[in-house]
Every structure is written in C-alpha cells, then in structure tokens.
Image: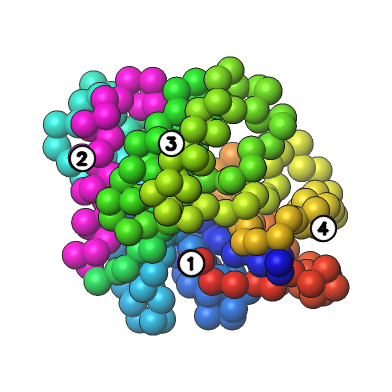
Amino acid sequence: MQRRLVITADDLGVDPDTNATIVELLREGVVSATTLIPVGAAAEDAVRRLTAAGFTQPRLHITFSSARGLPPWRPITPGVSTLTDARGMFALDPAYAERRATAADVVRELLAQLTWMRELGLRPAGLDSHSGTLYGLYGRSMAGQAVDFCAANGLDFRMPRTLSRTLGLAVRGLRRAHRSAVQRADTLRVRLPEVLVSSWLPGTMVLGYGQLRTEVLHQLRRLPAGTSELIVHPSPPSAADWLPAAEARKRRWELRLLRDEVFHRALRRAGIEVVPAW
C-alpha cells in the first residue's frame, strides 16, 4: 500500500495575517488541508478569504480554550458553563474544559461550531481538536464522544490510529482510552490518519531551522503505509506581536519548511504522495 501524506496548516481564524499566509500556501499547493477555529476573532475573515480562493473544505478545529496573547474567545453556544470560566469565556488552559466539561455541553458546542461553518457555505469534511482538548492529553479523554459526533455528522477525525509510545507512557490511562476510541471509529467507519507528524518540541527547545527540518523528515521517513498527516502552524513575522518569541520563531520556521525544496525532494525520494484531506 502506498504512503500518503496530508499536509495541514492549522489555526485559520486566529488573526488576518495568519489567514492570508495559510490561504496563500493553499494557492501554492504546498499544503493540502487547513483547519478553522470558528470562535477566533478573525474567523469570518478566514471564511471570506477561503471562499474567494475557492477552498471550502477546511476542517473544524474544535476549540474549547483561548490563545495566549490574544483577547479571550467565547463559545458560540450560550450557557455551556462547564466549558467556560466565570466570565463565560474559554480559559487559557486547555485542561480546564477537559476536566470540567459535561458530555451535553461538549456536544452542544461541537454542533454549534460545525453549524456556524456550514451556514457560511463551508463544507468541513473532518474534525480535530485545538490544543488537544478532546484527546485526553490532560487526563480525561473525550475521544469516544468525538468519534460518535463524527459518525453522526459524516466527518473524519484527526486522531492517530497509532499512538506514540512516549505519549502513551506520559499520560495515565491514555493508551487504553485511545485504543477504545480507535476501535469505535472502525466500528462506525470514521476515518483516522495512521500517524500524526509534527515538530512536537516546544519553541524554546527548537534551536535552529535545521533541527526542525531534521525532526520532521526523520518522522516522515518512518511513515507506515496508508494516509498520515503532517501538522504545521505556519505564521508570518507579525505573529511575534502575540506569541512568545520562541514560539513565533518556530512557526516562521514551519512556514519556511513548507517552501523548502529539500523538504519536498525528500518526500518525492521517499515515495510519499501528498494528498488532500479525505
């Protein structure tokens, strides 16, 4: 079986400059998918840019937390109090909602963010989780609920079929919850990527562009057969206005990677076909 790769630029909707950068990458064909944060301050700007460019299938980047350096984000659904802080806003810490949320509030906000996209003419084919809130990275997995939601709404789910050994050891109970969610996805015919690839280190630990490129290429050379996904957060220099310096620098390097001929040549040599999201 052939090795295929979806290259996804995350985080449409955070600000207009990021939107412009990602849409340009889509036009260039160096990314094959993107994700949209419906509660982001620039979400409507992202929709206008996508529509004008003829790209109408960004994934729903379901969001239950705010972003550091930006004004806090508010849920679309009123009254989902187990997802929000005392002000009715999403907290900065993604663990806040994961540990407190009721199943009813999660499903209500999932449906509200999906409906918002559809009512603006978008046709999201998949779901994934901003800051990993659904996946149980902070001790409580909601991946099973997410799979059920995807099955009910005809969506794919960005959850890797194979969990990294390091992550499985780091979070108690995660491997068991992940295995259960994968089995449920197979039963309900919700498509999953084989593995997820990214520059996983925090910005403070990525000391140079060469290190970032080597880290990503090392993972890509080990891709299994089937469809996997590379996640990047490409950002223009203006992201330094709201991101910590090290994280802004890392995102600029991820943008550089997408236009790096060494990177694309390595994909071709490895026989990895870049494909759109399902």
Please state the horizontal and vertical placement of residue 130, each as a whole percent of the image: 45, 43
Is disc 2 in contact with disc 3, using a CB cutoff of under 8 Å?
A: no
Q: Residues within 10 Å of mark 1 (few under 14, many from 20)?
A: some
Secondary structure of the residue carrying tag 1 is loop
* Residue type of the residue flagged with mark 3: Ala
| Mark 4 to mark 2 CA distance (whole Å) | 40 Å
Residue 15, given in percent of the width and then of the height, sits at 42, 56
Which SS class for mark 2?
helix
* Residue 255 seen anywhere in this rendered image of the structure: no
Which residue matches tag 4?
Answer: 221
Calculate the distance from the C-alpha at mark 2 to the C-alpha at mark 3: 16 Å
Image height check: is 264 above or below 68?
A: below
> In the rendering, which numbered label is found on residue 278?
1
Left or right side of 233 for 1: right
Mark 1: amino acid: Trp
Report the mark closest to the observer, 1 or 2.
1
Q: Find residue 143 and name its label.
A: 3
Distance of label 4 from label 3 (alpha carbons)? 28 Å
Whether the residues at callouts 1 and 2 have beta carbons within 8 Å, the answer is no
- The verdict on residue 69 being magenta is no
| Apparent side of residue 85 relative to residue 65 in the rendered image (left or right) | left
